[in-house]
């Protein structure tokens, strides 16, 4: 009987061990935007995470790279959108959640406060003005690794 109990205990540990050793999903990586027009690569930057535009469905206009025309700083309006840092300063506030970050919207040249919430291969980004109640949420999905990055 002791051998049977010991055998069952060993079998239970063998089955549960891979689950216990599995790592939690990471917010870092490449994420396809909700409109499927861009991929944002999220990466560690110090003790926080940041994100840059790593792929555009339409990277060019008039045969030239799309530029950050709406940037409030005239000196930055000639920088290409591809490679542009769009997420800054996010720190982990609880498991699978990052806050106190900013997201830059190149369509209007404005920065918004934002939070990130990870649920498996889905990332919810909530951008807002003032408090999260006054905002909008986008759902991003893990990007297909076959999508090439920015040129150069």
Image (cartoon, grey):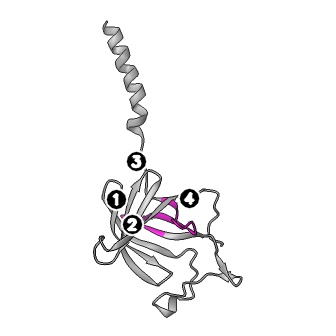
Residue 71 x, y percent position in the rendering: 48, 87
- For mark 1, what is the residue? 97
Q: CA distance from mark 4 to mark 1?
A: 20 Å
> Which mark's residue is nearer the viewer, 2 or 3?
3
Residue at image point 50% right, 81% down: 107
Of residues 147 and 137, the one drawn nearer to the viewer in this rendering? 137
Horizontal and vertical percent for residue 8?
36, 17
Tell me the crowding category of disc 3: few under 14, some 14 to 19, or many 20 or more residues within 10 angstroms, Cα based: few
x 43%, y 54%: residue: 26
Mark 4 and mark 1 residues within 8 Å of each other at the beta carbon: no
> Nearer the N terminus, badge 4 or badge 3?
3
Residue 51: horizontal and vertical position, in percent? 47, 68
Q: Does residue 7 sit above or below 25 in this rendering?
A: above
Q: Which residue is mark 2?
A: 46
Give the labeled residue for mark 4: 143
Start-end of magenta stretch: 29-51
Taking the image as shown, residue 76 lies to the left or right of residue 61, namely: left
> In terms of depth relative to the viewer, which is nearer, 18 or 69?
69
Contact, mark 2 vs mark 3 (Cβ under 8 Å): no
Tell me what residue is drawn at x 34 percent, y 19 percent.
9
Q: CA distance from mark 1 to mark 3?
A: 12 Å
Closer to the eye: label 2 or 4: 4
């Amino acid at each position: 009987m002791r051998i049977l109990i010991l055998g069952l205990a060993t079998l239970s540990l063998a089955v549960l061990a891979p689950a216990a050793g599995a790592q939690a999903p990471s917010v870092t990586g490449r994420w396809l935007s909700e409109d499927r027009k861009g991929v944002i690569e999220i990466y560690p930057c110090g003790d926080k995470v940041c994100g840059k535009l790593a792929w555009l469905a339409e990277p060019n206009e008039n045969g030239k790279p799309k530029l950050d025309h709406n940037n409030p700083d005239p000196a930055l309006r000639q920088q290409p959108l591809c490679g542009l840092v769009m997420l800054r300063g996010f720190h982990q506030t609880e498991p699978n959640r990052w806050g106190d970050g900013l997201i830059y919207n190149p369509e209007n040249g404005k920065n918004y406060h934002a939070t990130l919430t990870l649920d498996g291969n889905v990332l919810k980004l909530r951008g807002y003005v003032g408090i999260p109640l006054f905002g909008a949420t986008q759902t991003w999905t893990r990007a297909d690794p076959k999508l090439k990055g920015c040129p150069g």
